[in-house]
Image (spheres, rainbow, N blue to C red):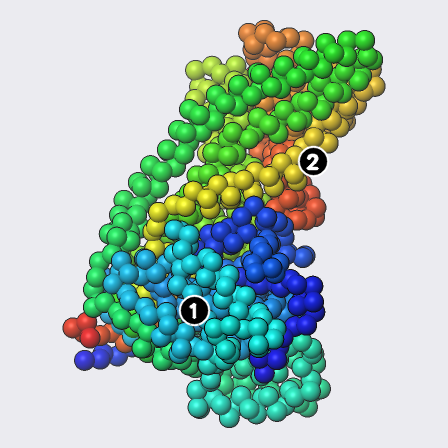
Amino acid sequence: MASDQIQNPKSKIQNQITVALAGQPNVGKSTIFNLLTGLSQHVGNWPGKTVEQKTGTYHYNGVRVNIVDLPGTYSLSANSLEELIARDYIIRERPDVVVTIVDAAALERNLYLLAELLSLPAPVVLGLNMIDVAEQQGVQIEPHVLEAALGLPVVPMVATKNQGVRELMEAVDQVSQACPERRRNRATYAPIRPEIRGDHQAVLAQIQQFIAGAVPDPYPEDWVALKLLEGDEEITSMMRERLDEARWQEVHTILMQHEDAILAVAGGRYEWIGRMVRAAMVRPRMGQVTLTDRVDRVATHPFWGLLVLAGILGLVFWLTYTVGAPLQELLDTYLVQTGAEWVRSALSGAPAWLVGLLADGVIGGAGMVITFLPILVIFFAALGLLEDVGYMARAAYVMDRFMHLMGLHGKSFLPLFLGFGCNVPAVMGTRIVDSPRARLLTILVAPLVPCTARMAVLAVLAPIFFGPYATLVSWGLIGLSLMMLAIIGVALHELMLGGEHVAFIMELPLYHLPNARTIGLSVWQRTVAFLKKAGSIILVVSVVVWALSVLPGGEVESSYLAAIGRLLAPLGALMGLGWRMMVALLTSFVAKENTIATLGVLYGAGEEGARLAEILSGVLTPAAALAFLAAQMLFIPCVATVATIRQETGSWKWTAFSTMLLLVLSFSVGIVIYQVAMLVGWGV
Amino acid sequence: MREKCVPLTTLPRGEVGVVHELVGGVGFRSRLATLGFTPGARLTMLQNFGHGPLIVNIRDTRIALGRGEATKVLVERMTNGQ
């Protein structure tokens, strides 16, 4: 059946073919994708999904090859969104060739995906990657023997050393050749397909008989029958709709009798794999202790593992403060402020509103985007490096027991931790969380991690209000934020997932040397994504907030922003806060640091910190000051974070939900703190 | 020599077991079966402190499992590592 599907006349005429790149996670698939496509990549999302889709092209033998990088999946069942995307693509889009990359060091488990791919009508080329790692572990594989056993091209590769890439291109070219006479070395593509075990063969035939004629195009009938037997949810509901009641009952009865068939089907596939590799693979004697095992004795230990994690995170933050923060200041002084001054002097004759719009609104917003870059690049590089060497899974492993307490997966820990530096990379970093709902939950709680900017505001204001108790109050408020994070996390987990237990099943990949190209590209792509998507939203919002703060009269005191602040005064009164404090809270939406600048303007203290301190300590009672700081810590994150939430969730609805949630939370906590503080007599 | 079936959580570090059965929903069994936890597959316990998640080596892969998940994997314990 497959050999006629190989001949896709449409693509041959246009002299271009489409290749889907499949593989399990941690097999070096993205390294190979990068080697094949170079910088011709396009990063986007799968249509209607928030799963990243990478596409690219290369030319070989006069043919333009379009590559679609499928999400990394262990199989093609309906266990995850990624698996659904991968199989839907192969079934519906009919790529000319599917290249599947396998890790030679864990060959049997990796071939499971191949066993599934072979039951779909697309020719497969096998890239046998990491043969160097396999050899280090004493595993010898004969690619030619494997090729003969499987009946499809097998290309040995060491992607990290750029070995085997041309051979892979050649094999793809061979398999995709439409006319048999143009094929040179390999005469035929004749794969040996896995067959279901004898005891289930009759059952499968029965199912296939009942569904015959009712399977929608382009699903292969035998594949649908197999998926029904496996208990695949998506295919089951599809066929329930398609079949008439009587036939569905027949099928359903058979399925109920073979509820445990998935184990037999999977077991059968592993038996097939065992037969395929038997002659091709020489395994070492058992009990070898590898480097990964030795490192993991420390890195995954419940105590030492935490110390290692703390050390690594400490290093990342040290880098951020010693390299990132000074760079940020340099950019601000030399690029943003100079730019604003240049605009002012160049437009000295222009109307004041235009100068203000450009110097404060546009350059202010663009400047904020630019000054974000050093910290983002450092965080993205750290994230990419830890991911690439294989450490990320260990961090998730040691943190899982703590994260589980609030219904989160261990993998949510790292992005959340990055939030202490900046909430933007925290939200973007949630991409490593593989369950979509757990990822959304992580994004929703991420803004409750106090970022450096929030803590900077706290560091300025706490001493003004609380003098010698400032440190105590600051730690208390940071603790409050994290407590709220835990409470909101548990609550959302109950509401969104119905308290459903997030299964912790995770591969711990082998450690390997980092690949600069892979990390560099991931930093580049994430940074560009931030600039393109979040950057424009930040710019627009900062112009709008600037306009609100000067219109109609040009003064903040009489602006629309002040009017909004006055509108919120009754709410503020519940926290003991006047309209000026409410406006300060609102402007923190553009950037957290704005809180202090706004207070300076509104209280007429100018640029001098000392006067502001004097005035502020006079206007607020300790109760109101505490309420204000608490509300400030829990308030909506800055516009950069909100824009990133929109980018990463792909939904304005969830972005609005996140904003409303934090708005309600911050005001409620502020009100409770003020009222309680009044009761205990801090109102004077 | 084979002993009777026990949950994976009771297998001490360094011990070898053979997967006997997976209990739980079809999604859970499908995920684990895909990763190689099929009846008859050998696994070695790499880390098990008696609390928290554990790590096993199965089909040349290190898989971390939460304790809840591991109790649903029934294994036959092998003595003498065979």
Kindly state the secondary structure of the residue where label 1 is placed: strand
**Which residue is denoted by mark 1 in the rendering?**
A154
Label 2 resides on the chain identified as A
Is residue A357 shown above or below A310? above
Rendered image: mark on residue A537: 2
Residue drawn at x 23%, y 67% as measured from the top left? A284
Q: Position of residue A152 (x, y in %)?
A: 47, 74
Between A662 and A510, the one lying in front of the other is A510
Which comes sooner in the sequence, label 1 or label 2?
A: 1
Q: Quadrant of residue A383?
A: top left
Rendered image: mark on residue B81: none
Kindly state the secondary structure of the residue where label 2 is placed: helix
Is residue A434 shown above or below A517? below
Residue drawn at x 57%, y 92% as measured from the top left? A206
Q: Where is residue A455 in the image (x, y as percent from the top left)?
A: 50, 26
Residue drawn at x 41%, y 46% as measured from the top left? A515
Decide: few, some or many residues near mark 2? Use Cα within 10 Å; few <14, some 14-19, many ≥20. many
Label 1 resides on the chain identified as A
Amino acid under disc 1: Val
Amino acid under disc 2: Ile
Report the quarter where the N terminus of chain B lies: bottom left
Residue drawn at x 51%, y 50% as measured from the top left? A34
Between A181 and A376, the one lying in front of the other is A181
Q: In this view, does A548 lie to the left or right of A675?
A: right
Between A18 and A637, the one lying in front of the other is A18
